[in-house]
Image (cartoon, rainbow, N blue to C red):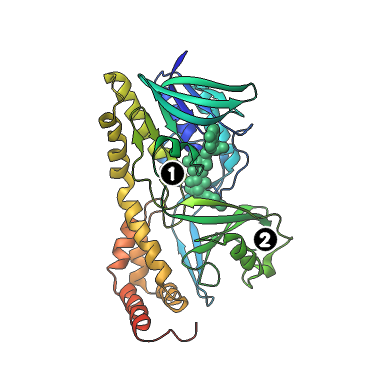
Amino acid sequence: MIHDVVVIGAGPAGSYAAYCLAVRGYDVVVLEEDPLVGKPTYCSGLIGLEAFAKHNLPINAIIRSFTAARFYSPYGTEALVSSDRPVAYVVDRGEFDRSLARQAQEAGARYRLATKCIGISHVDGGITAEIRGLEGEERIRARAGIVATGVKYNLLNGLGIARPKRFMEAAQVEVRMRDVKEVEVYLGRKISPGSFGWAIPLGNETVRLGICNGGKAIRYLQGLLENPLIKPRLLDQAPRIKSKPIPISPVKRSYLDHVLLVGDAAGQVKPTTGGGIHYSILCAEIAARTLDEAFRVGNFGERQMAMYESRWRKEIGVELRTGSFFRRLGGWLSDYQIDYLIRSYRNPALRDLVQRTAAFERHSGFILTLCCSQFFWDSFWARLKSKVFRPLSGE
Ligand SMILES: Cc1cc2nc3c(=O)[nH]c(=O)nc-3n(C[C@H](O)[C@H](O)[C@H](O)COP(=O)(O)OP(=O)(O)OC[C@H]3O[C@@H](n4cnc5c(N)ncnc54)[C@H](O)[C@@H]3O)c2cc1C
């Protein structure tokens, strides 16, 4: 039997692509190596409202919404960035994935759980996926394949596609902690050099506490748990810390004939925060649309498939480039400059700039406007001078 599409991976990218294809009437089979969808989860589950407004996402998985985030500088200065309406939701990530899978199944997609894809090869007019499941090994054939395997890149080696170049590591725990009213963001070299830590309150004093950085995220999260900002508010001992890499640069090429890469597998993640759910969903929808067109014209060749890449780069390419630039720039700032920027938020002009340009899922407008602002250059120039002429004092 030859399926229309085989989707490898039942995370948000795979299940949403499967749903978008199944509602169009295609015969879709989804392979998931874990025995259950949505387990284990490593994610904080923060998703911008924009994602729910633009896509058919499961609202039953929403735990709560947020209108504000409180930023803490390394010297304890606070800035409350708030909006008069909700900007993001936090979801139960396991339930989010399971609901997306249910939605795809209701549209007609078939799921094969505890089934790992161990290789993909091109055959005449399609692909063959080699799979290993409860009943041993077998091969299944399809006209096209979507690789949505998250940060497991083994299949890309066989396809001759290079994995993303840059990664960060993220570590997270769920703890009981009091007095966390809005999302909290912790900055500073001791907290997480060039990156940040976060606390996301879920209600009933349960909080997702995490760190992302270039490496050693677990060690930095252990440090955050001991930080005077956090420790006095903790109500219990932190359980086991989970960590996982996040790609922060896209793959050079996200297509081959008959095959598309979607989500973390393609590095479609915000480099600023490591948030990848919305971009996975957005690119899954584009992948499904591209394959739909390929079926209609009966052409799965590289030129046809290349339309997927040009479309998603048009949607989020600027975000990925400016985000990556900002992450590097942020890594350059000293604790003093970070504190200066947070203090500057008291200035009505900077507040206005943030209110006008900041968006949860798209950071380029804010980054470009900030980088052209006086506050930023005052701070940045001080760092540049200190780097060139003398070490920074007090750090
Ligand atoms: C600590 C942490 C916190 C995060 N917080 C946020 C956040 O708040 N907001 C946000 O937007 N993003 C967040 N992210 C990123 C987000 O989790 C990912 O971007 C998102 O899960 C990507 O979805 P995906 O479908 O591409 O991959 P995944 O969700 O990783 O799904 C891939 C699936 O493929 C399966 N699979 C892999 N290989 C195979 C194979 N060979 N055969 C069969 N199945 C296979 C896996 O088992 C998995 O189920 C966070 C990440 C981490 C690590």
Name the spot of residue 87 as percent of width and height, x first.
45, 51
Furthest-top residue in view?
Answer: 1
User: Could you say which quadrant of the image residue 51 lies in?
Assistant: top left
- Count neighbours of disc 1 (C-alpha within 10 A) and say few if under 14, some if 14 to 19, many if 20 or more: many
**Amino acid marked by disc 2:** Met
Q: Residues within 10 Å of mark 2 (few under 14, many from 20)?
A: many
Residue situated furthest right in the rendering: 236
The spot of residue 233 in percent (x, y) is 68, 66
Q: Which residue is mark 1?
A: 278
Q: Residue 4, image x and y in percent?
A: 41, 19
Task: In the rendered view, tell whether residue 39 sits above or below residue 247.
Answer: above
Q: Is residue 309 visible?
A: yes
Q: Nearer the viewer, mark 1 or mark 2?
A: 1
Secondary structure under the numbered disc 2 in the rendered image:
loop
| Total numbered badges shown on the rendered structure | 2
**Above or below, 386 relative to 205:** below
- Specify whether residue 59 is in view: no
Disc 1 within 8 angstroms of ligand 1 (CB): yes
Q: Which mark is residue 177?
A: 2
Q: Label 1 amino acid?
A: His
The residues tagged by marks 1 and 2 sit, at their Cα atoms, a distance apart of 28 Å
Quadrant of residue 338 in the image?
Answer: bottom left
- Work out whether residue 300 or residue 240 is closer to the camera in this orientation and state it: 300
> What residue is shown at x 74% (from left), y 60% (from top)?
237
Dot 1 lies on which element? Answer: helix
The x and y percentages for residue 325 are 34, 61
- The circle drawn on residue 2 is none
Residue 228 lies in what quarter of the image?
Answer: bottom right
Q: Residue at x 36, y 39 (%)?
A: 254
